[in-house]
Amino acid sequence: MLELTAVEAHEAMAAGELDAGEYAEAWSKAAAGDDLNAYLWRNEDGDGGAIAVDRPSIAPIAVKDIFCTEGVPTTAGSRILDGYRPPYTATAVQRLIEAGAPILGKTNMDEFAMGSSNENSAYGPVLNPWDRTRVPGGSSGGSAAVVGGGLAPWAIGTDTGGSIRQPAALCGIVGLKPTYGAISRYGMIAFASSLDQCGPLTRDVRDAALLLAILQGADPCDSTSVGLRQAPQLPDREDLKGLRFAVPSDLTEHVFDAGVRQVFEATLEKIEALGGELGEVSLPHAEHGISAYYVIAPAEASSNLARYDGVRYGMRAGADGDLIQMYEKTRAEGFGAEVKRRIMLGTYALSSGYYDAYYGQAQKVRTKIAADFRTAFEEFDFVVTPTSPSVAFGLGEKTADPLAMYLNDFFTVPMSLAGIPAISIPAGLSEPEGGGPRLPVGFQIAAPAFAEQGLLDASYALEQAIGFDARPQGVRGG
Amino acid sequence: MAELEAVIGLEIHVQLATRTKMFCGCELSFGDEPNVHTCPVCLAHPGVLPVTNEQAIRYALQIAAALECEVAPRSIFHRKNYFYPDSPKAYQISQYDVPLASNGRLGDVRIHRAHLEEDAAKTIHVGDSGRIHGSSASLVDFNRGGTPLVEIVTEPDLRSAAEAASWARLLRETVRQLGVSDVNMEEGSLRVDGNISVRPAGSEELGTKTELKNMNSFRFLERGIEAELARQRELVEAGGTVAQETLHFNPSDASLTPLRSKEEAHDYRYFPEPDLVSLVPTEEMLREARESLPELPAARIERYRKQMGLAEDTAALLATDPATAAYFEQTAKEAGKGVEPRVVANWVTGELAAALRQDGGDAGAAESKVEPAALAALVAMVQEKKISNSSGKAVLATLVAEGGDPAAIVDREGLAQISDSGELESIVAAAIEANPDAAEQVRAGNRKAIGAIVGFVMKQTKGRADGGEINRLIEAQLDARAG
């Protein structure tokens, strides 16, 4: 029964053919077999009191450890939140609980969602289920790995510059970053508040639609949340007739690995075969997305992470010294290198005298990128790119070179800056550069703000045509 | 060197008396057990988000209307980043380059801006210094953290410590009458800081200012500013220069201590608060704010001057406190057309205030036993010369002590003016007889000597005669005799 998608399981439960409790129990056992370091906490032995679901009625779910869960450890992958058990539950998680989805566990992640490989977790890297010498992507690496690795039927994660889409691509699953404001951020530990967005990581597009329907909606606790205009429906579109897909040549002309390019081009052919129209579009400012992103996100992070001081919750070091020493020691020991790097970057970018040159300038670029997309969407329904410039890379391969690591987000960051929805669907397998077993390649489709239904419909049609049914060795499915 | 002129601007923090905090649902309180009014939001737990208190916006709009400010159609919140135990998020949500309100006026002082923000928590540093550095422990009470504040910044339009204190009182009364704050300086719901500088009189340029904090009463505000002005004048007159710094006023000895530069060297790294949407007041909110305004002291002073002909200082004395103002207006109305409001005003601020002081109580006119109708009747009797001025004062003293009807008191105590001129003439004649020396001096041209004769008449009549009439009769009789 673990081969069922969440939607299929849901339908079977509704038809009385599947016992929701037994199904949840089976997944709980599967999750216990985690050999990817994907779960930081699993819901067993009744440890999840406050987030317990009395009567399961939908597939159980894995939750990125960035979501606060009352009474249940929540670390955001950081040592500084070691031992923290929040006094409240995030709205997104609450909605899952109310929908009857048992929480399977909390998944590993890059510390405070800063990273593209999951190697920045204070609790050790997550392994890619397709090749355990490789990274699962990040920052929602744990959520992607549990779904790709058969340790959960579906999961939620967060995406700030690609943190759902890129790991979904690297783990061969579907990852959706909804429009900014579609899902409440309340209780989602902030990295870069103007970019962070919760979203589904699922086996297929229909599961993503069902999960989005549960999660989305305006929340009185989040003034920036508006929800979608209409609750998403399960997609069933079979063709792409009359739909126009744009390839942004400014982005795709940049070199990425040959295998990824091949899968990307094959997917474009499938779009045409389904009756979709292809064209080129210019997003002249999009290639500056990474530069703008790595000013804005660290700037907001430097402010968001200033609250971790060892006083009210989490880890405390240097308690034998005076207050200032305690602060300094707690933060020195509590934060990892990448987090410190971004706090420094962001603090600098906001400093008086530098604000206009960095933060102000980056915001202007952001506005230009959003305008580029608006112009593109006057002519086209979707913008498509590869999700990631490469397939999953080796553990430790890019840790010494932060800039090389940052380029993982090259195709995903522009949509984050524009606040528009984008999905990554598995499009095929490709041999990594340097050889080895073939690994999943993601195809990214972006749509105008709040056009999630159209995005899901088109993705579903394309997903059916691609017919991706590969699974990592030893993982049931399809 | 030209005389040095004081240039003073004020920064006022007003705690709004909303039911809940600025960005969460915790109740406001004063004096409760520490840390009972807290939640994940105001304790800055990971993942929480602020939600703006609508009532706070409405109150701030009322203040903006009372200060005749322009309201920004779209203002935004910023994060003001600073690391301190009283600020659990390590930033304060405030407004920066686009405040809610700007370009206003209260009385003669221009308002630069007024904006919404949240209050910090309360800290107590245990140790000799009382400051965070070198303290053995710092205790934080988060009850106050997140209380809605309106910060009001004036232009540097004040020219003396007394003027600053008196304007601050006007502001307090204005905000109090809106009903949006307790405006209690001792409890900290009204906090006034001063920006102080001196410059050669007549100069248009501003001198280097210092910021003066911790003046938690109007008296301390005045004393603090005075002390700082004296310090700056002495410095500048000795050829020195004023350093820009923040000074802490110590009320116990009126000393000024610079705050440690380490605590002050802030780069607040302002940036727009991404967790909140723009603040866009609706037409309905703006209209409600305008319509909810009671007549405020400044407007009332203006009306008393222009429509009722009161002198400015008398108008200010009556208009500032709404109860006194209502008392005055009721008395003027009862007194009717025959009595000018100016006369009633002088009675309320002069004779009545003096009689109340004499009586020893600290009750204002409105709380006294003297009903507006009674005072009106009394003033009318004096005006119509039914009783003399001095009898009027005597009746007022009785009214203050017992209340009642002035006409009855006049009857009871036989204070009605001697209206029979024959009776008064014979008393005057007797008085001249009894004071021959004085009479002689008056005849010789020493007008002051008449006082002895007048006093004799007053004594004989027990004050029931009109002073002017007595004078006239004495002069007439002396002239007649001389002639």
Image (cartoon, coloured by chain):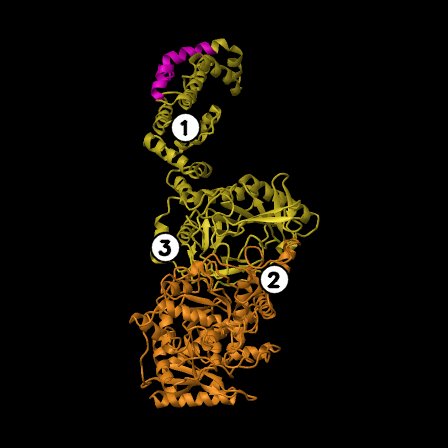
Q: Which residues are magenta?
A: B405-431
Examine the image and state in which quarter residue A48 appears: bottom left
Secondary structure under tag 3 reads helix
Residue B73 x, y percent position in the rendering: 40, 60
Q: What type is the residue that disc 2 sits on?
A: Arg
Secondary structure under tag 2 reads helix
| Mark 2 chain | A
Q: What type is the residue that disc 3 sits on?
A: Leu
Q: Hue of chain B?
A: yellow
Residue B369 x, y percent position in the rendering: 39, 26
Q: Is residue B406 magenta?
A: yes
Q: Give the crowd class for mark 2: few <14, some 14-19, many >=20 residues within 10 Å.
A: many
Q: Which residue is mark 2?
A: A331
Q: Which residue is mark 3?
A: B286
Depth check, front residue: B257 or B435: B257
**Left or right: A273 as drawn, with respect to B353:** left
Structural distance between the alpha carbons of marks 2 and 1: 64 Å
Q: Which residue is mark 1?
A: B368
Q: Hue of chain A?
A: orange
Examine the image and state in which quarter residue A46 appears: bottom left
Q: Give the crowd class for mark 1: few <14, some 14-19, many >=20 residues within 10 Å.
A: some
Q: Is residue A79 magenta?
A: no
Q: Disc number at residue B241?
A: none
| Mark 1 chain | B
Q: What type is the residue that disc 1 sits on?
A: Ser
Instruction: Using the image, determine if residue B362 lies above or below residue B446.
Output: below
Structural distance between the alpha carbons of marks 1 and 3: 39 Å
Residue B228 x, y percent position in the rendering: 62, 45
Q: Identify the main secondary structure in magenta.
A: helix
Of badges 3 and 2, the one in the foreground is 2
**Left or right: B458 as drawn, with respect to A82:** left
Q: Are marks 3 and 2 in contact (CB under 8 Å)?
A: no
